Image: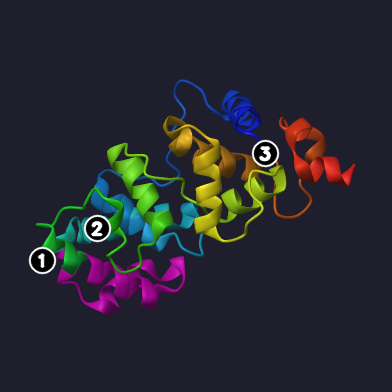
């Protein structure tokens, strides 16, 4: 796909899903520490499920120092319904200890520093950087971004790091954060995993999957 075509797709999706008051955050966070923890918790579950534990969790563990000294069993009880709760508990407590020891309890603002934390890969780091600090280091690739970008023809890869590279080469940097939101929104509303609603798709004229199917 050429850059001009990718930019056209971005513009059409923006017209479909973005308004003046659109909330670009699927997770309901109040500060960088919350979005870091909640993004780690969001693995293999829904944003709705993670949002549902926010109040109970952060009322008890409002910051890194509080979570760093938490008992694993207490944290597990609160986040259990998010799935994989033992591994997630281990990661968020360990990450909080590193935040306290190496970053004065604050969430760092670089990709290298964030990905040094347990449970944090490029996807999580990209989300934290964009949502918490307005920094576009890359494009977070989740299951929706992976599926939609491949179907459209923006990438021929299935590896998230390679997909991110392909997308960032096609699109201007100031669109990266919003493109994540747009692809997720389109993947949930139209380009679903099963039975995508191609006939109602606003970008079907540019879509490889639609052209091949027809």
* Residue found at x 26% / y 78%: 72
Which residue shows up at 63% across the image and 45% down it? Answer: 188
**Residue carrying label 3:** 1
Mark toward the start of the polypeptide (3 vs 2): 3
Could you tell whether 194 is left or right of 111 in the image? right
Q: Position of residue 166 (x, y in %)?
A: 55, 47
**Looking at this rendering, what residue extends furthest in the top direction?**
20
Membership of 72 in magenta stretch:
yes
Residue 101 circle label: 1
Do the CB atoms of the residues marked 1 and 2 lie less than 8 Å apart? no
Q: Marks 1 and 3: in contact by CB < 8 Å?
A: no
Mark 3 or 1: the one toward you: 3
Spatial CA distance of label 3 from label 2 is 33 Å
Q: What's the mark number on residue 137?
A: none
Foreground mark, 1 or 2, reads 2
Give percent across and percent down for residue 16.
62, 27
Identified at 69% across, 44% down, the residue is 153
Residue 109 is situated, as x and y percent measured from the top left of the image, at: 24, 48
Instruction: Please name the residue that numbered disc 2 is placed on.
Output: 113
Determine the CA span between mark 3 and mark 1: 45 Å
Q: Is residue 8 left or right of residue 204?
A: left
**Residue 40 horizontal/vertical position (percent):** 37, 61
Majority secondary structure of magenta residues: helix
The magenta-colored residue range is: 66-95
């Amino acid at each position: 796909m050429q850059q001009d075509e990718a930019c056209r797709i971005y513009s059409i999706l923006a017209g479909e899903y973005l308004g003046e008051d659109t909330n670009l955050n699927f997770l309901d966070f109040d500060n960088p520490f919350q979005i870091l923890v909640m993004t780690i918790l969001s693995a293999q579950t829904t944003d709705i499920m993670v949002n549902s534990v926010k109040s109970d969790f952060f009322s008890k563990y409002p910051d890194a120092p509080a979570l760093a000294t938490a008992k694993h069993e207490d944290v597990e009880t609160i986040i259990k319904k998010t799935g994989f709760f033992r591994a997630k508990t281990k990661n968020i407590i360990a990450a909080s200890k590193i935040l306290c020891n190496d970053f004065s309890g604050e969430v760092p603002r670089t990709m290298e520093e964030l990905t040094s934390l347990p449970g944090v890969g490029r996807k999580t780091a990209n989300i934290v950087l964009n949502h918490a600090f307005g920094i576009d280091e890359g494009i977070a690739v989740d299951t929706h971004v992976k599926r939609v970008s491949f179907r459209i023809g923006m990438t021929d890869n299935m590896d998230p790091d390679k997909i991110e590279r392909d997308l960032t080469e096609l699109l201007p940097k100031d669109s990266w954060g919003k493109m994540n939101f747009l692809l997720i929104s389109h993947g949930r509303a139209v380009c679903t995993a099963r039975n995508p609603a191609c006939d109602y798709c606003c970008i079907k004229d540019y879509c490889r999957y639609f052209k091949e199917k027809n």
